[in-house]
Image (cartoon, helix red, strand yellow):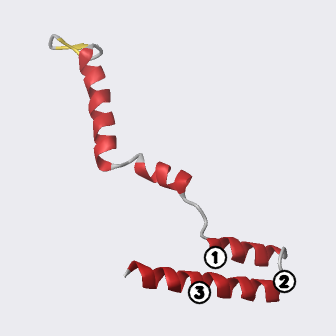
Amino acid sequence: MFHDGYHFWGMHLIWWFIWVIILFSIFGFFEPVRKTRIKKDSPLDILQKRFASGEISKDEYFENKKILDADIKSAGKTSH
């Protein structure tokens, strides 16, 4: 425990933990965890999953896809 009169297990160890936490927060090591929790599927992703699982027919898929594509195009025109 002691090395040349230096005691490692006191406040020195606590400061190492504090610096590690500071570095994790500065460099964003916790950020990927937050992003995976927040990620939501887009309406098109949901439509594709419903079609793939057989919840909707091919005709319903293409009809809804056409509506979503029109919404995306109209939203793009209004944002400019």
**Which residue occupies the extreme left position in the image?**
4
Find disc 3 in the rendering and name its residue: 70
- Residue 57, numbered circle: 2
- Residue drawn at x 73%, y 73% is 49
How many residues crowd mark 1 within 10 Å: few (<14), some (14–19), many (20+)? Answer: some
Q: What residue type is labelled 3?
A: Ala
- Residue drawn at x 77%, y 78% is 51
Q: Which amino acid does label 2 sit on?
A: Ser
Nearer the observer, 69 or 4: 69
Judged left or right of residue 22, residue 72 is: right
Give how far across and how far down residue 48 sits, in percent.
70, 77
Q: Is residue 9 above or below residue 18?
A: above
First-in-chain label (2 vs 1): 1
Give how far across and how far down residue 50 sits, in percent.
77, 73
Q: In front of the other: label 1 or label 3? A: 3
Give how far across and how far down residue 45 sits, in percent.
64, 73
First-in-chain label (2 vs 3): 2
Q: Distance between the residues labelled 2 and 3?
A: 20 Å
Find disc 1 in the rendering and name its residue: 44
- Residue drawn at x 44%, y 85% is 77
Q: Which amino acid does label 1 sit on?
A: Leu
First-in-chain label (1 vs 3): 1
Nearer the observer, 32 or 4: 32
| Secondary element at image label 1 | helix
